[in-house]
Structures are given as structure tokens and as C-alpha cells.
Image (cartoon, rainbow, N blue to C red):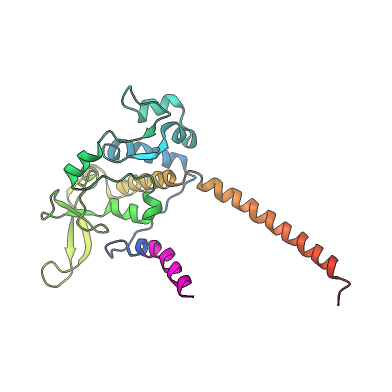
Amino acid sequence: MKRLLIASILLLAPGLASASGGGGFHLEDADIDLADKESLQRGAKYFVDHCMGCHSLKYMRYNRMGEDLGLDEVRVRRDFIFDTKTKPGDAMVSAMRPEDGEQWFGTEVPDLTLVTRWRSPDWVFTYLKGFYADESRSYGVNNTVFPDVGMPHVLAGLQGLQKAVYTEGEGHGSLERLEAPARPGHLSAKEYDGMVRDLTNFLAYAGEPMKLERRRLGLYVLLFLGVLFALAYALKKEYWKDIR
């Protein structure tokens, strides 16, 4: 019984950690749709343009992404591959070396293929919206769900730089909310939300490209098991009908 209890706690721990948001900040609903290929295409482009300079998707290949998202090889080469050495069959790996990431950011830059499975889409969505000005940090920003983050706000030019509002208390108190950017970005709040939602949608797809297919096949499996159960039950009744 004790071993069963420990195993249950270990299985639930990742979900509890995701629900807490890492910093105790409320997670927003990402409201993603893996069936929306236009959103996935936009999200893929946002990732390559704004994230792939540092982060990789080492378990995803360009041509696999193109096939799943309805992109032909010509468009994949034009919109997602920016050098002559990389081929469509290659993995989506950043050009930045791990040792450079450690030197510049103080830690190895993580691969993001499984980030939505590790953290959850809601966490990623809130994280990308949760940067705010903090002069005490080396890059001048902090994050609501990832306190003391070592990453600069690479999307600040689009979102702007938000200001934190703290509750009453010693020092700063606790973080209560974020105010609209004092320095506006190129996108409105609604446009930025849409962009971040597309980016989160793409990262959720990258973490499990077969999710929609798995669900579709799962329905057929359940129907098959239902029919099999009915036949097995009828057979059992036939065998046991003369036994009182």
C-alpha cells in the first residue's frame, strides 16, 4: 500500500507542478486547436523567426513538419530554411552551440520539442505573455511564471515591456498583476495574444505530432473493445446457460 501511494504521488507531481504555474501565478487558457493548420503554419513561422536562433526542435524534421502542416518542399525551403547546408530532411536544430548558450545565459538553452508536454500549453502561453520590466535582472526583465528567468524578452518589440504591480507588503510585496506596456510594441494586445496562441499551438503539435491521429484511432479501438465485450458476454451466457 505504501509503495502504491508513493507511485501515485510521483505520477501526479508533474501535473501539480504545472497547475501551480511554477511561480504561483494564474495560468491563462491557451485555447489551442491542433486541427487549425493555418494557426500551426503561422506558429511554425513565428518559431523559426523569433525562437530558433537559440532554441531547437531536435525531434522534429523540416519535411515532417511540412507534410503535417500542408506545406510543400518549396515553401519549406523558402520560409523555414535560411542556409544552403540544411536540407528538408534535417532536424530543426539551432545554429547556436550549447557552450555559447551557457556562457551567454548562464545555463544550457533547452530544446523546446517537448516543452508543452513538460510544462503544459497553458504554462507556455502564460510564460510568453508574462515578461515584465525588472531592473534587478541581467536582461532587465523577469517573468510571472518563471521567476528569475535567464532569458531576454525576445518578443518585447512586438508586445512592448509590461510593468509589474505589487501588493502591499515588505519591499515589493507579492506580484499582483501586470500593467499595459509603458513602452508599446508593434502589435496590439489582441494581436500579440493571437501570435502567442499560434506559437503555443505549434509547440504543442511538435511535442506530439500524432495526437489527433492517436485520438481518432483510440475511438475505433474503444468501439472494437465494446463490440468484443458484447460478443464475449454473449458467449459466456451461452456456455453457462445450463449451469445453475
Q: Is residue 136 above or below residue 65?
A: below
Query: Observer-nearest residue: 84 or 42?
Result: 84
**Residue 90 place in picture, x, y as percent:** 40, 30
**What x and y, as percent, mark residue 198?**
38, 45
Residue at position x 25%, y 45% in the image: 108
Residue 164 falls in image quadrant: bottom left
Magenta region's main secondary structure? Answer: helix
Residue 190 on the magenta segment: no
* Residue shown at 33% from the left, 39% from the top: 56
Horizontally, is 171 left or right of 158 in the view?
left
**Residue shown at the point (64%, 52%) measured from the top left:** 221
- Return the x and y of residue 211 as percentages of the image width and height: 51, 48
- Drawn side of residue 92 relative to residue 137, left or right: right
Q: Position of residue 205 (x, y in %)?
A: 44, 45
Give the magenta part as a residue range: 1-16
Which quadrant of the view contains residue 92? top left
Left or right of 238 in this view: 13: left
